[in-house]
Image (spheres, helix red, strand yellow):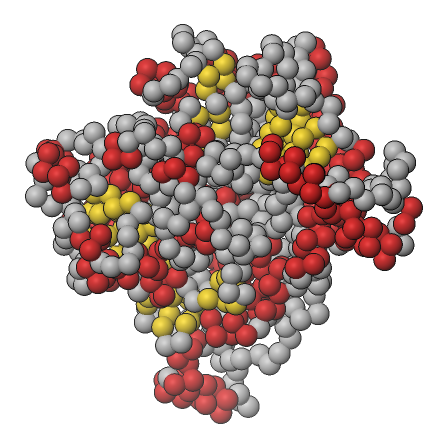
Amino acid sequence: MPAARPLFDYPKYWAECFGPAPFLPMSRAEMDQLGWDSCDIIIVTGDAYVDHPSFGMAVIGRLLEAQGFRVGIISQPDWQSKDAFMQLGKPNLFFGVAAGNMDSMINRYTADRKVRSDDAYTPGGKGGSRPDRASLVYSQRCREAWKDVPIILGGIEASLRRIAHYDYWQDKVRRSILLDARADLLLFGNAERAIVDVAQRLSRGDSLAEMTDIRGTAFIRKDSPEGWFELDSSRIDRPGKVDKIINPYVNTQDTAACAVEQSKGDAQQEAGSDVQVLELLPHPRLERDRTVIRLPAYEKVKGDPVLYAHANRVLHLETNPGNARALVQRHGDQEVWFNPPPIPLSTEEMDYVFDLPYARVPHPTYGDARIPAYEMIRFSVNIMRGCFGGCTFCSITEHEGRIIQNRSHDSIIREIEAIRDTVPGFTGVISDLGGPTANMYRVACKSREIEASCRKPSCVYPGICENLDTDHSSLIGLYRKARELPGVKKILIASGLRYDLAVESPEYVRELVTHHVGGYLKIAPEHTENGPLDKMMKPGIGSYDRFKQMFEKYSKEAGKEQYLIPYFIAAHPGTTDEDMMNLALWLKRNGFRADQVQAFYPSPMASATAMYHSGKNPLRKVSYKSESVDTVKGERQRRLHKAFLRYHDPNNWPLLRETLKAMGRSDLIGNGKHQLIPTFQPAIDSYQSARRKNSTPAGSPKAGRVLTQHTGLPPRETGKRKAGKGKPRSGAR
């Protein structure tokens, strides 16, 4: 892995003398109280400002503050005019713009493209506090407010939309968000390294145009620089004519117009009858740090879904920071250049970031208003970043990378103590020690050399890689240390568990089940059938069965009544009607009833989204004749797949009866134990009324989450749960 300068190894900017602020200011009055005449950097975000390390604006803001810069926050501004973007004055260095912790379109719309009424990142949980495509709108308003101030895009919306990408809501391929936002620079992935480097250079008087060597950045470039080899992957690989070897220092697109190259080619042809000229060229595979891969142009992928799938495959093959090459993609007459991903943070750097002086509560301007996302995480601790699972529908690996970045035990324990001592309302229960997954902490490749050269999209699919060290001992030790802290009554694990890893460590499963399950545990098999599981890059249901046996065994040994609550996805690419029928039968056999279900949501840049758009599988070599993928796009079929997950809902029985008859499976209609739905149809109104009565209020933290009920659980109780009883229902996708 290339070396990187530590975050804490930069000289401090002169404004360090002001010291850390209780909260990063959101008004001129707060700036006056701090003694500031201006902000060096202003962060514009679509989320409410919560000064907590689970919120992106707080992490970046506090990190820049630790570098000595004065950082202001403009949170959820009125985007109808530039006025709200001028409230803190003109920033001395740049505007940092982010849509928030979620892509704004996913935040604003359901998988059925309906406007959400709630927003977990807004005070009171109310929807409508951010615009569609927030990064674009905020950037435009910043430019209107101060035309000469650089604009730097960041956050997950910028990461997932940095290249030409399929947009589910418009059902078309859009340009790179860098161009549409007219920003000066885009930072993708976890941006701590890039943002510190950019801020430090700007403070020294460097221009953004000179900053072309920063990893994890995208920018507009006129041409490939001298000394670089351009590898053309703008077409799907297939046999064709062999072009003459050209000078690698000349951009391939300019070769036709290059008189020197043309004359060289003519001279070689003339000499061909007598002497064969052999020219030795640098091999691009041996000089990856000086090679750029040309992706198909925006105009090409926009009109050719198969070429889009090819581009998506190339992109995902260049995501390992140890061997990734730069990418370039033409948009009209402009070139968007993408440097390799950022180098992962070391444990010392992770500790540095998480030990910054966060207030750990929302900004006082919100008063007593509840921010649902904060309510969910205020007593939880993030112990790591990244995920090497590579699930095709998920954005975690694409944004945070597949190399796990870990905090030290000491840093984690300090945060638990800070929660205990400072966070209002703490009752002694830590709601989660986790991250993107609960049990990838300190799980890594056995060899740094192999890790740096590996190009596999997943370390656990189709099976656990033989080079992956699945030792859970450090995590077990962390759990034990945390339980022993004075004032801490219970440590729960609420992050999704990677159960195919967990079964490799029975000691970990015993520790987890005995001490850290609050009645139920969430896991994500996502499906039971191999067709969709292969397209998701998820393990077979056999891994779930193995984990379930261990879970029940250790629960019984501990004398506890505990339940597994699985997540499932409807309408994922590669899923047939028969797959969903078999999943419904599995749910009924195992006593599960999903109160709400989530259909597949095509997020920008995901491999599953490329499958959805193109009908091709980018996990394998793509061609016009390569493997086709079943996709679920029509409203009726998406509704049918969701109906199979809610097989117990009388509202769905007419559609299911019609479908089962068409599939030749009328044997599943009836009142028998092994049949899926009954023959009779009850009145719908009374059932709907009962559902509304028991539904979760729109503003609560669980609103909009998918709930799966195990029919073996005890009835819902009012007030405090009885000792030893599990929760009646839980969150599931």
The front one of 695 and 685 is 685
| Residue shown at the point (34%, 33%) measured from the top left | 369
The image shows a total of numbered marks equal to 0
Vertical placement of residue 173 versus 545, above or below: below
Instruction: Locate residue 424: give its quadrant.
Output: top left
- The x, y position of residue 298, in whole percent, is 47, 71
Q: Quadrant of residue 563?
A: top right
Q: Nearer the viewer, residue 239 or 299?
A: 299
Residue 517 placement, left or right of 147: right
**Residue visible at 51% across and 45% down?**
397
Residue at 34% across / 21% down in the picture? 423
- Determine the image quadrant of residue 191: top left
661 to 235, vertically: above or below: above
| Residue 629 at x, y percent in the picture | 70, 60
Q: Is residue 247 visible?
A: no
Give how far across and how far down residue 256 sits, in percent.
43, 84
601 with respect to 75 (left or right): right
154 or 271, nearer to the observer: 154
Residue 495 visible here: yes
Residue drawn at 61 percent across, 50 percent down: 600
- The image quadrant where one finds the C terminus is top right
Q: Which image quadrant: the N terminus?
A: top left
Reply above or below: 573 against 513: below
